[in-house]
Image (cartoon, rainbow, N blue to C red):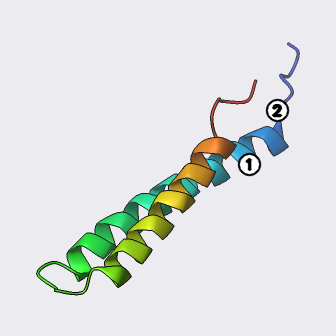
Amino acid sequence: MARKQVNWSGWSRYYLGRTLQLLGLFLVTGAMVLFFGSSEMRPMLGLTGTGAFVFFIGWLIARKKPA
């Protein structure tokens, strides 16, 4: 029985992207919880934008599963 070759770099890149997506979601959720009821909008928008950017970078990295 032949062993199947595993694309380690591809899978590592895929899971790095998925991890960045989760981190981005946690940043957005944390910003909303942290600044709930606060009159300060700028820090909340900054943290939410950072979370969205991290999520987007993760999405770009992990768009498709490696073969």
Q: Quadrant of residue 5?
A: top right
On screen, residue 25 versus residue 19, left or right, reads left
Numbered tag placed on residue 6 in the rendering: 2
- Estimate how packed mark 1 is, as few (under 14), some (14 to 19) or many (20 or more) residues with alpha carbons within 10 Å: few
In space, the residues marked 1 and 2 are separated at their CA atoms by 11 Å
Q: Looking at numbered disc 2 in the image, what kind of residue is underneath it?
A: Val
Q: Earlier in the sequence, mark 1 or mark 2?
A: 2
Question: Does 25 sit above or below residue 6?
Answer: below
Q: Is residue 32 above or below residue 52?
A: below
Amino acid residing under circle 1? Ser
Residue 50 location (% of width, % of height): 50, 69
Q: The N terminus is located in which quarter?
A: top right
Going by the image, does 48 lie left or right of 65? left
> Residue at left 73%, top 41%?
11
Residue at image point 83% right, 22% down: 4
Q: Residue at x 27, y 80 (%)?
A: 41
Give the left or right position of residue 62, taking residue 36 as reference.
Answer: right
**What label does residue 12 carry, if any?**
1
In front: label 1 or label 2: 1
